[in-house]
Image (spheres, rainbow, N blue to C red):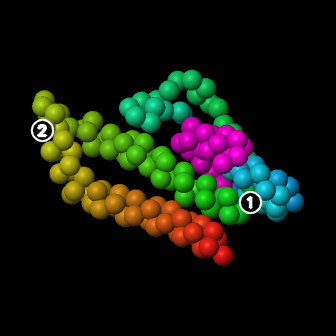
Amino acid sequence: MKSQDCYELERINSYPKLHVRKITAEEMSCEACDLHRYCGHLVTLSGQAYDNQTLESDDFLQNDWQKLVIGKVCANRTEAYHQLRHYKYFLYRRCIPFIEETKEESANEIVELALSKMEAKNFLGTEVSYLESYLNEADYFQEENKDWLLS
């Protein structure tokens, strides 16, 4: 892996928000893979950094953002990777309201009540569907990579 790839991966890992939009394609080095190609996607990475283990927000560089101009393949792969990389964090953020509205005392009661509320709103089924679609998209790129290596 090139040092450029490691740097871009680090940036994608650092920012929980991703916005990709099409722009007028320009022949240049892709800022994700460093290959010379037509790059017609602007990727904006932003959001509050967080600790991947504790999911607690990091107050360092609160309003920081990064922009990259990349090709179509890298844009698709970036979106797929980013969704999986930050899924746990966003799931955690979506679970907080279920926990905060619970007034129980013990941790077991809080968890049981929050889970029953989630089940009543089909929250868990919806989240499983999201995760499965993200995994399927990642599998597609994995299979595409294997096909490319074998040809």
Residue 106 lies, in percent from the top left, at 12, 31
Q: What residue sits right under mark 2 in the picture?
A: 109
Among all residues in the image, which is located at the extreme right?
A: 27
Q: Which mark is residue 25?
A: none
Q: Could you tell me which secondary element the residue under label 1 belongs to? A: loop
Q: Which residues are magenta?
A: 1-20
**Is 58 positioned to the left or the right of 5 in the image?**
left
100 relative position to 81: left or right: left
The image quarter in which residue 41 lies: bottom right
* Place of residue 120 in the rendered image (x, y in percent of width and height, measured from the top left): 21, 57
- Residues tagged 2 and 1 counted as in contact (Cβ below 8 A): no
Image vertical order of residue 125 relative to residue 118, above or below: below
Q: Does 80 lie within the magenta span? A: no
**The furthest residue to the bottom:** 151
Position of residue 117 relative to residue 38, above or below, is above
Q: Which residue is mark 1?
A: 71
Callout 2: helix, strand or loop? helix
Give the residue displayed 72% in from the left and 43% down from the top. 4
Cα separation between marks 2 and 1: 49 Å
Identity of the amino acid at label 1?
A: Gly
Dividing the image into 4 quarters, which one contains the C terminus? bottom right
Which of the 4 image quadrants contains residue 126? bottom left
Question: Quick check: can you spot residue 3?
Answer: yes
Q: Residues within 10 Å of mark 2 (few under 14, many from 20)?
A: few
At horizontal 62% and vertical 61% (from top left) the residue drawn is: 76
